[in-house]
Image: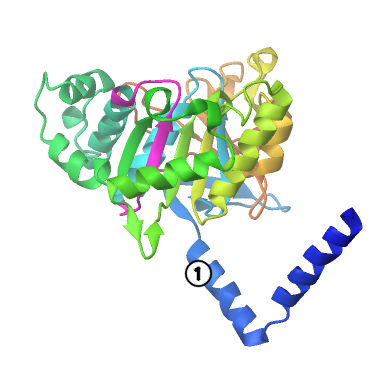
Amino acid sequence: MNNYIGQEAAAELYENLLTDDDVYLESLKEGARRAGEGLKTDIQLWSVDNDGNHSTFPLYLPKYAVSAVTARTGGGKTTLLSNMAVRFATDGKTGLYVTLEEADFAINAKMLAAYSSYTNRQYSANRLTTGEAFKVIAGEKQHEDMAGYREKVMSRCRVIDANKQFDKDNIASPTLLYQVQYIADLLGFVKGDGPQLDFVIIDFGQLLEGAEPTESSYQRMKSVMQGLKNLAGTGIAVCIGAQLKREVASEWLFDIQPESIRDGSDVEQACSMILCVGRDTKQKDIDQRDVIRLLKNRNGRKRVGGMLTIDFEHNYIPTLTEQPTEKAL
């Protein structure tokens, strides 16, 4: 019986493959056009070739794929994710920032601070700190950047507090996709025939629940990552925050690998790109500077990274990174 069902499915697939070459090529072109280079972030990274030559290139978040940003607790994960969201929105992209750790107003305060820093790059005195931005969001303080934030960021990227706005117990495939599309529709993020988002950021992914409450930790994360892959398969750039394992939190940042991530095997298998960010004060040559490393880059350059100083007070990440030491790559 199972063999017969399998033969039926294979025959149907074979029929679908019997199409004109030009039609098939057009479908490939359309897919490649929609994917493009991905969504451009504000970060320039360094790569090194086999001859030791360094070069810089802009970091793009791939569409049709799941990416991850990992860090120690307090290491800059949310700072990097919120800065990405601000950049994507100001570039005219639509998306959702799903927060499972901090409240939606706290994330909006951080994004407003980041937007203020982008707007006033040359005028540091005019930048909002995260604390000041919180007061602006709360209506306790006025600031000229709020109008621009509402127009250029909030209208295109809505922060969703999943703890009160999502059905967390059924957030895995396919429910996550349905919920995201439904919210996109309600917000008017619609292009063509239906809801169309350019990006979904989830901070952080390991707090998502699986399809069944009784699932083991392994089954839960496997189910969650499959749901995120299904979501990305609709043409969306999906990026999750991911915590490092507690036992590797004290390791040198240079020694951290994808398997250092909590539930690392499932995250590594599902993600096309994994970024690690943090400060490693054990290395004297980079003391007081943060490191960004690409732990995985399925379709791009290897040995990629950079050094920079994250401005946590203003929730701001500088555009350009410094050339990293050899060990950082």
Front one among 6 and 165? 6
Q: Residue at x 22, y 24 (%)?
A: 133
Magenta residues, start to end: 91-105
Q: Nearer the viewer, residue 180 or 175?
A: 175
Q: Is residue 153 left or right of residue 41?
A: left
Question: Horizontal and vertical percent for residue 129?
Answer: 25, 23
Q: Mark 1 — residue? A: 33
Coloration mode: rainbow
- The answer, for residue 178, to whether it is visible in the render is yes
Q: The C terminus appears in which quarter of the rendering?
A: top right
Please provide percent x and percent y for residue 85: 38, 41
Q: Say above or below: 222 vs 287.
A: below
Q: Secondary structure at mark 1?
A: helix
Question: Magenta includes 138?
Answer: no
Left or right, 43 with respect to 145, comes to right
- Residue at x 9% of width, y 26% of height: 142
Vertical arrangement, residue 179 with respect to residue 315, above or below: below
Q: Residue at x 32, y 21 (%)?
A: 313
What kind of residue is marked 1? Arg
Q: Give above or below for 13 relative to 268.
A: below
Q: Quadrant of residue 294?
A: top right
